[in-house]
Amino acid sequence: MDVETGNDDAEKGRPIGRRVFLGTMGLGISSLLWGDTAWRAIGDAMAPLVRAVPAAVRDALPSPADGWRIYAVNPPFPEFDAATWRLTVAGLVGEPASLSLDELKQLPRSEQVSDFHCVTGWSVPDVRWTGVRLSDLLARVTPDARARALSFVSLEEPYVDTLTLRQASLPDVMLAYGMDGRPLTREHGAPVRVVMPRMYGYKGVKWLARIDVTDVVAPGYWEQRGYDRDAWVGRSNGYS
Amino acid sequence: MTATPGWAGRMATPSAGRATSVALRPRFGATERTLHWIHAAGFTAMLATGLVLYLPALSGLGGRPLVKALHLGSAVAWGLGLALVALLGDHAALRATRRQVERLDGDDLRWLRGSRAPQGRFNAGQKLHTVLQAAFAALLIVSGALLWLGERNTSFQLSGTVPLHDGATFVTVALVLGHLFLALVWRPTRPALRGIVRGSVDAAWANRHHAKWARDDAPGPRRRRPTRRRLGLAAVVALVGLIALGSFVRDAAAAPDESGAALLYPR
């Protein structure tokens, strides 16, 4: 036991401070199990309030991005010029295409709600994507018989990733230009990004500039650095 | 705004010369002050780098791998600093502070309810603030360590880790803003700042705000020199800490073009 008694009121009183400390720690540690559920419930409860804030104000404020973690391999984020931006589709196709954003938007428009999973362990549930099904775009450019894969090249050099033609033809693979009812923002890959809900987010190339149709599946940016090429959610990259 | 006399007279003539008759009372020893400023510096560094990692609007500032390495590096440096203070600092003073902070007496409870009960060296608000800061710092370290481990082994990934790290940050920032307001802006409490910067406070102010402590004449605990064993332990801790710090810096220098390091920063 301590022998010093100098100038304090310490011997008196109840160990309330210690209890507050232990209680906070207990609550905090246990929240590793329930915190996610609680956080989402709070987010849902706050949603009407957030929507009440004018969009211009919302955009101007730095916000924690609703559960998103935004990464860039070559910051700052690319900026696209609506006047000059083109999505080029080239390679082993019958009809190469070079589409402006307006032309892309004239393709059949589709919408879906899907979950987004990052390989580092965070997820954003129920993202509402608006855009073009990749299969609709492919039907327009008509890949030839040798075509096996697509390389998605980003404005953010040197980012690139790939999908096999079969993976790209799954019904929920999209090129999205809208997210949660608004145009895709710069940090989410404006003007257009790849959405592949069944794979981890690094397959969803942002700031899309070009699609190369090829006969070999080239490794993408992170695949060159050890990640799985077929990045199925829950069945790749050490998850089982 | 008009000010109440007492302290106002003194605030109005701050440069009345060094040899004024303002009586001072020592409040914080070197150990406590060092501890406070290491904590403050670590918090500031981790908050600044953390915000760059967290807010998309700031993500253009510096490469993410570098900022992340700085974030982790400041956590290691902070922990190293605290460990060294714990090993080499004035143990008697640290123990006394801990006991004072973790116990609340009847006057403290009355003070919390808004009555003007006399307070000891720490008032009840300061006690609770200290306790909560300590708890949330510990939670930030736990959740931060889990984030770091989760990047290496998926079995460390828990759904609540990110909410805990974020939530603890919000609470801590709110606490710190209140703390800064009382220390730098709010006039009645501002004289306390001198105590954490230079060690002593105006005795008259102490009399009004910390009456039980101010009128207690018992000398503070005597400081003893660190033992050889403590010194040896401190050297080991310093070495381990510096090695850890070095490995984070190496990570930062290597990423994102070397495969091993790049694994830490996926998209």
Image (cartoon, coloured by chain):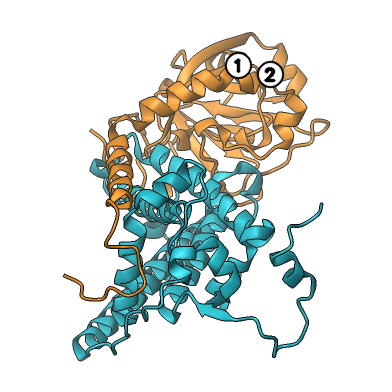
Name the residue type under label 2.
Answer: Ala
Q: Could you tell me if the residues under marks 2 and 1 are in contact, i.e. CB atoms within 8 Å?
A: yes
Q: Which residue is mark 1?
A: A48
Q: Is residue B92 visible?
A: yes
In percent of the image, x 78 and y 83: which residue is there? B16
Q: Which residue is mark 2?
A: A52
* Display colour for chain A: orange
- In this view, B117 is above or below A163: below
Q: How many marks do you count on the picture?
A: 2
User: Quadrant of the rendered structure where residue B190 is?
Assistant: bottom right
- In this view, B226 is above or below A156: below
* SS for callout 1: helix
In percent of the image, x 21 and y 75: which residue is there? A3
* Display colour for chain B: cyan
Q: Nearer the viewer, residue A213 or A52?
A: A52
Q: Position of residue A130 (x, y in %)?
A: 61, 16
Q: Is residue A228 left or right of residue A55?
A: left
Name the residue type under label 1.
Answer: Pro
* SS for callout 2: helix
**Disc 1: CA contacts within 10 A as few (<14), some (14-19) or many (>=20):** few
* Dot 2: chain letter: A
Q: Is residue A165 visible?
A: no
Distance between mark 2 and mark 1 Cα atoms: 6 Å
**Disc 2: CA contacts within 10 A as few (<14), some (14-19) or many (>=20):** few
Q: Position of residue A222 (x, y in %)?
A: 44, 46
Q: Is residue B18 left or right of residue A83?
A: left
- In this view, B141 is above or below B170: below
Q: Quadrant of the N terminus of chain A?
A: bottom left
